[in-house]
Amino acid sequence: MQTLRLNKNTFWGRLPAILCCAAVMFTALSASTRAHAQGASAGSATRAADPATRQSAAQWLDRIQQAAQQQNYTGTFVYQRGNFVQSTRITHYATKSEGEFEQLESLDGKPRKMLRHNDDLYTFVPERKLCVVEKRQNKDAFPALLATSGDQVLSVYDPKMLGSDRVAGVDSQVIELDPKDAYRFAYKLWADAKTGLLLRSQTLDPSNGQVLQQLSFTQVSIGVPVDKAPIVAGMRNTAGWTVVRPPLQSVDMEAQGWTFAQTVPGFAKIRELRRPMAARDASEPPIPVDQAVFSDGLSAVSVFVEPVEHNSRKEGAGSNGATHVLVKRNGDYWITLLGEVPQATLQQFASAIEYKAPK
């Protein structure tokens, strides 16, 4: 099995409208993942938190998720992984009657802008005069976490309350979440002491505390008035842009013959989707790609299934920071597993995937 390299996985690189499918992100390289699996196992030795600490941590996790959705805030955050750095400006506005309005704008590299009202998502690619319109699927983008309860997260992580700190000039509460087993990394979170808004998130190797990746505000204003008018106007005014609405539909992969045995503790399936991916040969029709997403509340694993025909995928495994990939063949299908988890977790997921052609 060859090793694979993941392309730079910025916030903008994760947008499904631009990349369509994470399976197109792979090219050849050398990478070792054994150390990550060994490091994760060290996390299982952490001492279980006392009930008061667990309750406090669960409440903070719930506050973090609520603040991301309900607070008004503007600022700039930075994504870091290894030598790669990407800055993004964010504006978020929320009301009880109209819900959420949000604008994200890349500050490095090629210009990108994303406008959102609730789950209606508009992504603008200026150099192509392209506007991609779709429904939001991933609701875990910084400063949000995956949509689940704090209690559920703590079924597979042990919390530590590390006291106070400051991020971008804002007083914060620091929480560390150590994995109870070898199937996930550790996390360290900084939340605004007043509102609970997530100010910084680090993914850590539990064996040595090494920061695998980080998202952090460098400047932020919370609870300030935000003008939603530019966001609304931008979503309405698409004259001169080529507007594309990629087909996206829910799919029942079990009805298609796929079964995913739950052999990794804490992970639950949260959605199944089908979207087309462009074939390598432009004369060929798009390739249907099915995606199942599993989450433990912090970590997520995506399983992509696509036909072998008209496809040049190769088996392999690789990593980039906290993100690991595994590609395997199952009969007439390629199975691609992708997630910010140790390679051993993807291997465990892959071993439990079975296919039986429906009658």
Image (spheres, helix red, strand yellow):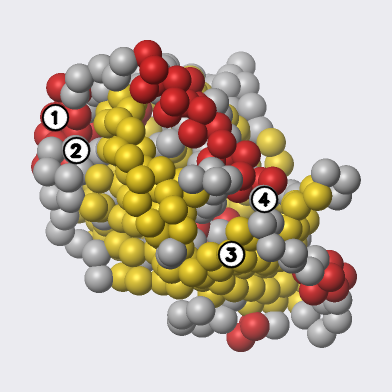
Question: Callout 1 environment at 10 Å: few (<14), some (14 to 19), or many (20+)?
Answer: some
Residue 221 got which mark?
3
N-terminal-most mark, 3 or 1 = 1
Tell me the residue that label 1 is attached to. 42
**Looking at the rendering, in which quadrant would you find the C terminus?**
top right
Query: Residue most toward the top?
Result: 51
Alpha carbon separation for disc pair 1 and 4 = 37 Å
Q: Are marks 1 and 2 in contact (CB under 8 Å)?
A: yes
Tell me the residue that label 2 is attached to. 206
Task: Name the residue at 64% across, 73% down.
Answer: 113
**Looking at the rendering, in which quadrant would you find the N terminus?**
top left
Labels 1, 4: front one: 4
Residue type at the position of mark 3? Ser
Alpha carbon separation for disc pair 4 and 3 = 10 Å
Q: Is residue 65 visible?
A: yes
Left or right side of 112 for 123: right
Residue type at the position of mark 1? Ala
